[in-house]
Amino acid sequence: MSDEQKWEAFKAGDREVFEQIFRAHIKVLYKYGSRFTSNAPLVEDCIQDLFIDLWQKKNTLGSTDSIKRYLLGALRRRIIRKLARHAPEDSPLEEDRYNFELVLNIEDELIAEEQNSSQQSTLNSAILQLSKRQREVVYLKYFQHLSYEEIAEVMHISYQAARNLVYQTLKALKQHIHSLKALLISLILNFII
């Protein structure tokens, strides 16, 4: 069953499909939400509220051809709004000032085990030099394998802004890593394997 068919079945009230959607995406949503804040209960609440709202508003929801993209975008907006409400009054949280952490670790490791620790350390150091939005776009593009269109929808930016952000991010990484070509080849090989 395609995403479009699942979504339409869910909107028609199919509880089993709704549960399938939840089970299929909960881990991805939690990992993505955890990049914005280390407050696990806040992330869990946002995910729970998202699914409650989806079920309650299923009759008014639009169509989608990618449930994952739809859920990531909805969760992102929900977390940013909730973080903004909890931010101190003297430091408002704006769309581009949220926190997004992306550091490679064992769980999320994209570099194959044969990569030596110095390459991983170099990549981690380069990622830490990126802006929060750049780290988010790396996560969406290379960890979640989203297209530019999907990134644009999730981050609530235009298609061209998504392409530009990925380009600028790769350009920034290239400045920090002299051996980017070797690392990118390794990353690509890891996606293929």
Image (tube, helix red, strand yellow):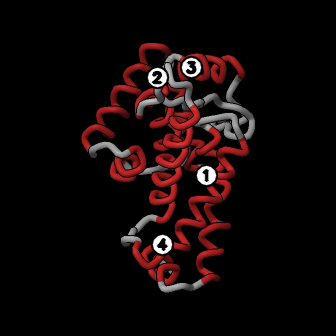
In the rendered structure, find residue 57 and report the number of the disc placed on it.
4
Of labels 2 and 4, earlier in sequence is 4
How far apart, in angstroms, are the residues tagged by discs 2 and 4? 35 Å
Q: Answer above or below: position of 11 versus 186.
A: below
Of labels 3 and 1, earlier in sequence is 1
How far apart, in angstroms, are the residues tagged by discs 2 and 1? 24 Å
Q: Secondary structure at mark 4?
A: loop
Residue 21: name its quadrant: bottom right
User: Depth-wise, is mark 4 or mark 3 nearer the camera?
Assistant: 4
Question: Mark 1, residues whose alpha carbon is within 10 Å: few (<14), some, or many (≥20)?
Answer: many
CB atoms at circles 2 and 4 under 8 Å apart?
Answer: no
Residue 84: percent from left, percent from top: 51, 35
Q: Secondary structure at mark 3?
A: helix
How far apart, in angstroms, are the residues tagged by discs 4 and 3? 39 Å
Kindly identify the amino acid type of the residue bearing the numbered disc 2: Ser
Question: Mark 4, residues whose alpha carbon is within 10 Å: few (<14), some, or many (≥20)?
Answer: few
Q: Using the image as rendered, state which of residue 110 and residue 38 is in the foreground.
A: 38
Number of numbered discs present? 4
Residue in the picture at 70% in, 23% down? 116
Residue 81: percent from left, percent from top: 49, 42
- The residue where tag 1 is placed is 46
- The residue where tag 2 is placed is 131
Residue in the picture at 48% in, 65% down? 67
Q: Secondary structure at mark 2?
A: loop
Q: Secondary structure at mark 1?
A: helix
Kindly identify the amino acid type of the residue bearing the numbered disc 1: Cys
Residue 42: percent from left, percent from top: 67, 44
Residue in the picture at 63% in, 21% down? 119
Residue 179: percent from left, percent from top: 50, 18
How far apart, in angstroms, are the residues tagged by discs 3 and 2? 8 Å
